[in-house]
Image: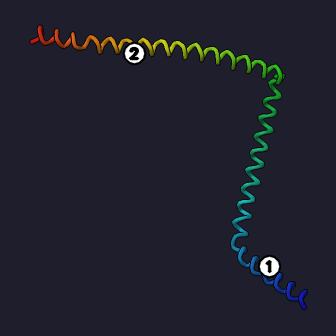
Amino acid sequence: MVIKKRHLSSICLSGVLFLCSCDKHELLMAERVQVESEIKRMMDEMISLDNKFLSLKVNTSTARVTMERHNAELARSNALLEQELASVSKKCSEGEEMVKSLRPQLDSYKAKFVR
């Protein structure tokens, strides 16, 4: 008797699950088709890119070394530009301080001679 109750309850449970998910079946199938088409499109694009890369006949180890060298050159260039920027910023700050120190003299000059 216990086996029959389990069997009956599992049938009822599967029936309830089936009835609850009937309305979602079409939506899920449409989403599945969309995902599969997107996967196919991406695979085709990946194959196309692989073919383009292979047509360049580039040795990957050579390309990596070249890219690392280029990256190192960019890092050196960036460091030089940062030093130059720091120098210019320092000069700008010094110029602003000079203007602040000369402002009172300029104001007194204007007060005396400009009417």
Q: Which residue is at the front of the view, 23 or 98?
A: 98
Q: What residue is at 61 percent from the left and 14 percent from the top?
A: 77
- Residue 107 at x, y percent in the picture: 19, 13
Q: Nearer the viewer, mark 2 or mark 1?
A: 2
Q: Residue under label 2, please give it.
A: 93
Query: Which residue in the structure is indicated by mark 1?
Result: 14
In the image: residue 33, left or right of residue 1 = left
* The N terminus: image quadrant: bottom right
The location of residue 72, given as percent across then percent down, is: 69, 17
Q: Which mark is residue 42?
A: none
Q: Quadrant of residue 83?
A: top right
Q: Earlier in the sequence, mark 2 or mark 1?
A: 1
**Label 2: few (<14), some (14–19) or many (≥20) C-alpha neighbours in 10 Å:** few
Q: Is residue 37 left or right of residue 113?
A: right
- Report the residue at 83% width, 28% height from top: 54
Pick the residue in front: 115 or 61.
115
Q: Position of residue 89 (x, y in %)?
A: 45, 16
Quadrant containing the C terminus is top left
Crowding near the residue tagged with mark 1, few <14, some 14–19, many ≥20 C-alpha atoms within 10 Å: few
Q: How far apart are the two marked residues, 2 and 1, measured between alpha carbons?
A: 77 Å
Residue drawn at (55%, 17%), measured in percent from left and top? 82
Q: Amino acid at mark 1?
A: Ser
The kind of secondary structure element at disc 2 is helix
Residue positioned 81% across, 33% down in the render: 51
Q: Report the amino acid beneath label 2.
A: Ser
